[in-house]
Image (tube, rainbow, N blue to C red):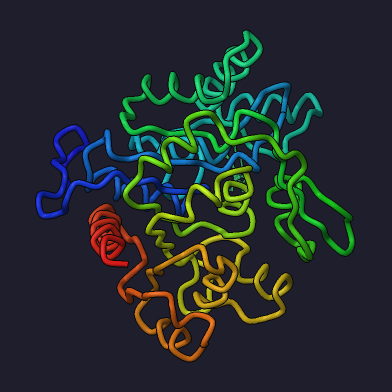
Amino acid sequence: MPDHETTTPTPDLPRRRVVVLSGGVGGARFLHGVARALPADDVTAIVNTGDDLAHWGLSISPDLDTVMYTLADLADEARGWGLLGETFGALEMMRRYGGDAWFSLGDRDLATHLVRTQALAAGATLSEVTRRLCLAVGVPQRVLPMTDGSCRTRIDTADHGALPFQDWFVRLRTAPEARRVWFDGDPPPAPEVIPAIRAADLVLFGPSNPYVSIDPILDRPGVREAIAGKPVVAVSPIVGGQAVKGPLAAMIATIEGEPASAAAVARHYGGLIAGMVVERGDEGAFADDPALRGIRVLATDTIMGDEAGRLRLARETIAFAATV
Ligand code: FO1
């Protein structure tokens, strides 16, 4: 796989302006493929910020950073978050001081949060500082936070009440059963979000968690309406009844009361999607459910094992989305 500087957009794909809705790792890897398949000007990522948190006095936007690091080829792919070649010296000292050490901020990653925090304190918007960070690490695609305002994901649990997302996800390792997901704050989308969707030929939902990654974006006022007239295709984050990564399979069971499946994700998106890309073997449930018969399905290999796999899935999804 060539470096991204030398990668040429796929010649046999027609020119399409694509918007990808994304959470962290799954969406970021899919975006990496889309970014290698199309000219940079044609790709806009709209990224969940419901996972954002203030920690050690810093403004942290995990999904924006995962997308940025992945597109810049700087991500630690094995860990699934943070930077490649990271060290955790500051975290070790924090632990010695008896400070909060449950959320692991790496030494190099700290620079990202320091720049963001300073810029926000000086009056920049999250959109502006994200653009600045992306340009600095060589990401030419447009990466937009879903909002410049505050919208925080909360997980209602039986034993611990309503938890901030990262408390549930990292500190408690998703152990408390998730009963409901809701968003604290209802800010408008960031200024470029609706114009980007209006200008798009295709809208793709990355293989991200629908409850905690895609829904917070869709719930920004005006986003569902802007998406409604577009060809929308979702890539399934569920493969053969299992989540590729993270707590989604358990969430479908506890929130919807049904086993995890690509079809359950499609039902959750309701009439919003015209097509879904699923793992081979997962397509049968779509034909069986009258509610899903209107959704076109592409069954393919959706596990993005390596960069070639991401690029292939991106090309197949874009070509498929042009037909829905
Ligand atoms: N995930 C973890 O499981 N443990 C961590 O300590 C952790 C730290 C962390 C720091 C910065 C960052 O950008 C992401 C980090 N993540 C960590 C990942 C993050 O919690 C989740 O991947 C996303 O919020 C879900 O998409």
Residue sitting at 59 percent across and 34 percent down? Answer: 147
The foreground one among 179 and 96 is: 179
41 sits to left or right of 15: right
Residue sitting at 66 percent across and 12 percent down? Answer: 121
211 sits to left or right of 242: right
Point out the image quarter for the C terminus. bottom left
Residue sitting at 36 percent across and 75 percent down? Answer: 297
Residue sitting at 63 percent across and 63 percent down? Answer: 247
Q: Is residue 203 above or below residue 191?
A: below
| Identity of the residue furthest to the bottom in this view | 288
Q: Quadrant of residue 199?
A: top left
221 sits to left or right of 153: left
Q: Position of residue 186 (x, y in %)?
A: 72, 39
236 sits to left or right of 155: left
Q: Position of residue 42 (x, y in %)?
A: 28, 39
Q: Quadrant of residue 151?
A: top right
Q: Is residue 203 above or below residue 266?
A: above
Q: Position of residue 240 (x, y in %)?
A: 47, 79
Q: Position of residue 245 (x, y in %)?
A: 52, 61
Q: Quadrant of residue 137?
A: top left
State ligand 1's quadrant: top right
| Identity of the residue furthest to the left in this view | 11
Q: Is residue 63 above or below residue 54?
A: below
The foreground one among 246 and 21 is: 21
